[in-house]
Image: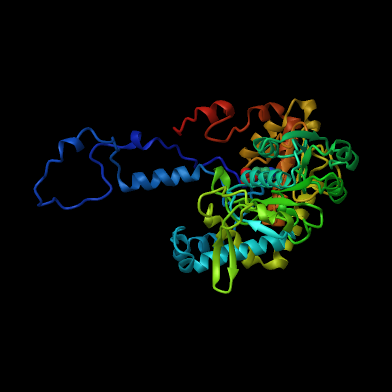
Amino acid sequence: MKSGPGTSGLILNEPLLWEKGKKGRRGMSIPTSDVPEAVLDAGLTGAGPDFPDLSEIDIVRHYTRLSQWNFGVDTGMYPLGSCTMKYNPKINDKLAATPEIASAHPMLDDGSVQGTLQIMYELQKYLAAITGMDAVSLQPSAGAQGELAGMLVFAAYHRSRGSVRTKILIPDTAHGTNPASAALCGFRPVALKANAQGVLDVQAVADLMDDETAGIMLTNPNTLGIFETNIRQIADIVHAKGGLVYGDGANMNAIMGIVDIKKCGVDVMHLNLHKTFSTPHGGGGPGAGPVCVVRELERFLPVPRAVKDSEGYRLEFDRPESIGRVHGFHGNFSVLVRAWSYIRSMGPDNLKKASQLAVLNANYIKERLKKDLHLPYDRPCMHECVFSDLFQHENGVKTLDMAKRLIDHGYHPPTIYFPLVVPGAIMIEPTETECKEDIDLFIEVVQQVVAEAREKPELLLQAPVRTKLRRLDETQAARHPCLRG
Ligand SMILES: *Cc1c(COP(=O)(O)O)cnc(C)c1O
């Protein structure tokens, strides 16, 4: 049996800088000053902050060690489902850091920032081309805010037609932000059950859709990693009753350049640039959640948008029916630059290939692990596959135990207990960037954990055993973090 990339050695302890410091230690020496000492204004004196005294090597080791306690996609595989934690090529970070771009002030005149406006304009065009939609706003700063903007567009559309709609249909597989965004706009979410194949049933939508319902919010591929095959028929039913269709595009990594979202009947969709389009987003870093709409809804999009006319690029504010701004200035601009750079450097053929490889890799894992882990929906998946811990129940081992044991073997655990419709879910998304050797190693390590669950379940109940800290009370750790190593 091969062993995973993890080892237990050389993980060094590190105290706080305050505990490490020693009075009089310093990081540099400067000659004694020949300028006489001056006494500061009375108001400015006092105890001052208690900074520890440290040498250069104290500091270098401190931060290097802390960095080694971290795990990220640059360290190893990060098989998080639905959230697409893929490797982001460094060239895109480099471009976002270009001084001319990074230092462009958002209040400069349009004439002085033609380059950055061009990036925005072109990105709007590219995202429209990739999704098949007609118009794009780059304003929202996360998927959830894109959903909120989308729901505001839904509300503005119905208001413009004098129609009062209070409900919205949302599948039980949806991400929690969907019902939350709908509720923030005053819509009451009505749950739709996925059928035995893990997709939405046309009849179930027909039964619930009425003229008090603003529309439907669905995710495609859905959070079970399955393509909503009935989407066009569902959209027709919703449209026939005057409703709109919202597409949650967080799972775009499975379908770039392959599915035309407009042809599926979707009217509004957000994209998570920090998931699909090359911005690292662990730990809640900056994101961008552009919204894409069909022509009929363009007039409601947030302002400003980048436009181009005979004089060049400019920001356009004059849209009386717009839902208004949803963000100061241009949102997290460097995320937009990364997406633009990613799309340009990949090109249409490679974007499509990335999605094809993401889907192939997930199906490969699904097929190779389905004897080891229970597969609730045994059918071709998209970019992620969802297992459960059913087979391990007889040994008293649960999803959480296996996820913790993967840490001992050097893997970040996959998404667990989501989607909620699969009890004990283990959701794996390898993404397109992992090579076959690395995926094979991951599979073998999961198989090893499954064997351990059978042979020494008591070990799994204690996992992780090789980490600096063992099994934490996660609620307590999140509410009262203790930062001492
Ligand atoms: C991540 C995600 C969201 C929310 O996006 P954020 O950018 O985290 O706000 C919504 N829906 C699905 C399916 C997601 O995976």
Q: Residue at x 44, y 59 (%)?
A: 105
Quadrant position of residue 184: top right
Percent coordinates x, y for residue 189 in the rendering? 74, 34
Residue drawn at 72 percent across, 56 percent down: 436
Residue 473, visible in the rendered structure: no
Taking the image in four quarters, ligand 1 sits in the one at top right
Q: Nearer the viewer, residue 242 or 338?
A: 242
Q: Position of residue 120 (x, y in %)?
A: 58, 62
Foreground residue among 233 and 18: 233
Quadrant of the rendered image containing residue 336: bottom right
Q: Where's residue 64, x and y in %?
A: 43, 47
Q: Nearer the viewer, residue 377 or 77?
A: 377
Q: Which residue shows up at 55% across the image and 61% down it?
A: 315
Question: Whole-percent x and y of residue 113?
Answer: 48, 66
Quadrant of the rendered image containing residue 15: top left
Instruction: Check the image and report above or below for 386 versus 363.
Output: above
